[in-house]
């Protein structure tokens, strides 16, 4: 049996731009990707803290150090610049993998710079 666990989360990042005409995805500052362990093309769920909308998309890397959090394509209609979002990725783990799994949570400031990284052990 597999259990779905949090892999990584960027907590309450501020949306810096939206582009409904782009073909889709979320653009995330490469430095935040490194801090969180999230990967380009990885599927993520994005939760908008201001309006409650949730959507699934995939990551494209943004300029390092830019603080960029851009919502592209149709999902751009579900949020707006200035909204706070939570970006989450999950993994499927076996019971053996659960014993060593650690999820990573990146807390950001108002400029989307990492201020704290927290790791949570599953078991």
Image (cartoon, grey):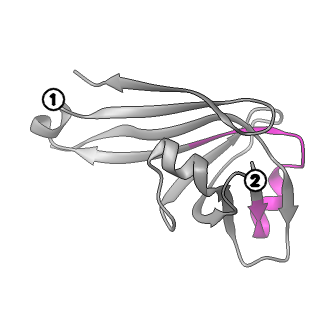
Where residue 18 appears, as percent x and y from the top left, is: 85, 60
Instruction: Name the element at disc 2.
Output: loop
Relative vertical location of residue 29 with respect to residue 58 in this rendering, above or below? above
Q: Is residue 77 magenta?
A: yes
Quadrant (top left, top right, bottom left, bottom right) of the C terminus: top left
Q: Report the residue at 76% width, 66% height from top.
A: 72
Q: Which of marks 1 and 2 is nearer the N terminus?
A: 2
Where residue 96 appears, as percent x and y from the top left, is: 9, 37
Q: Report the residue at 54% width, 53% height from top.
A: 44
Q: Relative to 55, is 83 on the left or the right?
A: right
Where residue 51 appears, as percent x and y from the top left, is: 82, 36
Instruction: Name the element at disc 1.
Output: loop
Nearest the eye: 94 or 109: 109
Q: Residue 2 carries which label?
A: none
Q: Relative to 8, is 92 on the left or the right?
A: left
Q: In which quarter of the image is residue 20?
A: bottom right
Q: How many marks?
A: 2
Q: What stretch is highlighted in magenta?
A: 71-87
Q: Report the residue at 86% width, 57% height from top.
A: 17
The mark closer to the camera, 1 or 2, is: 2
Quadrant (top left, top right, bottom left, bottom right) of the N terminus: top left
Q: Relative to 52, is 105 on the left or the right?
A: left
Q: Quadrant of residue 100?
A: top left
Q: Relative to 94, is 101 on the left or the right?
A: right
The CA span between labels 1 and 2 is 36 Å
Q: Decide: marks 1, 2 in contact (CB < 8 A)?
A: no
Q: Report the residue at 54% width, 51% height from top.
A: 33
Nearest the eye: 38 or 80: 38
Relative vertical location of residue 35 with respect to residue 44 in this rendering, above or below? above
Q: How crowded is mark 1: few (under 14 residues within 10 Å), some or many (20 or more)?
A: few
The residue that disc 1 covers is 99
The residue that disc 2 covers is 66
């Amino acid at each position: 049996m597999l259990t779905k666990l949090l892999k990584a989360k960027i907590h309450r990042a501020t949306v810096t731009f939206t582009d409904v005409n782009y073909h889709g995805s979320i653009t995330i500052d490469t430095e935040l990707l490194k801090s969180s362990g999230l990967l380009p093309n990885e599927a993520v769920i994005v939760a908008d803290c201001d309006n409650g909308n949730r959507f699934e998309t995939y990551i494209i890397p943004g300029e390092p150090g830019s603080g960029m959090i851009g919502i592209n394509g149709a999902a751009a209609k579900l949020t707006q610049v200035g909204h706070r979002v939570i970006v989450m990725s999950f993994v499927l783990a076996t019971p053996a993998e659960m014993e060593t799994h650690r999820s990573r949570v990146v807390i950001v400031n108002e400029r989307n710079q990492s201020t704290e990284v927290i790791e949570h052990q599953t078991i």
